[in-house]
Amino acid sequence: MIANFNPDQALALGRETLLIEAEAVLVLAERVRTQPLSDAFVRSVGLLLECNGRVVVSGIGKSGHIARKLAATFASTGTPAFFVHPAEASHGDLGMVTREDVFVALSNSGETSELLTIVPLIKRTGAKLIAMTGNADSALAKLADAHLDARVEKEACPLNLAPTASTTAALALGDALAVAVLEARGFGPEDFARSHPGGALGRKLLTHVSDVMRTGDQVPRTRADASVAEALPEITAKRLGMTVVVDDADRAIGIFTDGDLRRMLEQRSDIKTTKVAEVMTANPRSIAPNQLAAEAVELMERHRIMQVAVVDAQGKLAGALNLHDLFAARVI
């Protein structure tokens, strides 16, 4: 173990850091309720909602890391956004910014030279400027159309030098801004899923029954007048643990499962003479092809069933689905 390492001191400093950063966010939350920050916050939300272009977020150093995260949050919640490095902006990337955009600049001091170099040019294009700083008297704050004061009393760093509480406060204030904007836009779970198609929520909200159901020859179906013995090969071959019982118009009128077969055998019924219609479950649970696969999961879990028939608007058999299909599609 390192000679100077003191476990108790490490725990105490860790806890103190969390408390300092939590206090910084709580103080900021209270300031948002009062002027001038409340007015600036509302003004910033309005500028973002009125933006006909994109939100360009910028910062350098630790503020740059927060700016990247804020741009990603905006982009994933319905507001087209991207990060631009201020130093790169002064060497050509400034051409990405148009008069239709809103430029969000993050700097704790508000005096970052790289940002102050490009801000006059951004203002000249006609783009709106939102500044998030820890100094309301800074040059950046004075140039902004809306200034978000994210100052903190002290950093969590024992030297009061490393950006810690200040970056936490900026991150929290940026998230608050993004959430206020997404709520005002009416951004919902389906919108979120469309921007996260590879995530779990995307799969749940974008995958429909028709995307994962068995179709054609994969669907086990048996006529109502068939015997149980005639139905068994269909159950075995299609490997769904059931067969859907259909009438002459191919409408699903029942379902015959492995469980139904076991109960029948316990009663010593003759599988060759017993008709499927006599032992099937009539009016089976079913779902439409255009419903969400997540709804199929809910239906199966609620009724404690493993399979479900998929029927169209006329009640005709369109497919079949079981829990294994949903697991394979990663909907569950």
Image: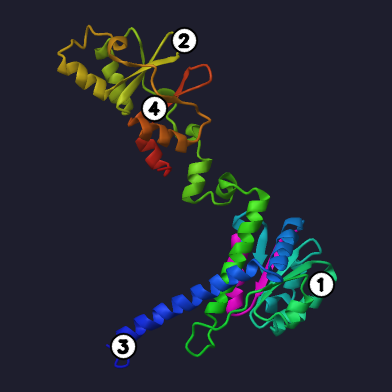
Q: Which mark is residue 308?
A: 4
Residue depicted at x 61% and y 66%:
174
For residue 150, above or below residue 245: below
Q: Which mark is residue 313?
A: none
Q: Position of residue 215 (x, y in %)?
A: 44, 27
Taking 176 as reference, is 52 left or right? right
Type of amino acid under label 2: Ala
Residue 55 within the magenta-colored segment of the rendering = yes
First in sequence: mark 3 vs mark 4: 3
Separation of residues labelled 2 and 3 (CA atoms) = 79 Å
Separation of residues labelled 4 and 1 (CA atoms) = 60 Å
Separation of residues labelled 3 and 4 (CA atoms) = 61 Å
Mark 3: give few (<14), some (14-19) or many (20+) Cα within 10 Å.
few
The reply to whether discs 2 and 3 touch (Cβ–Cβ < 8 Å) is no
Taking 320 as reference, is 87 left or right? right
First in sequence: mark 4 vs mark 1: 1
Q: Which mark is residue 249?
A: 2
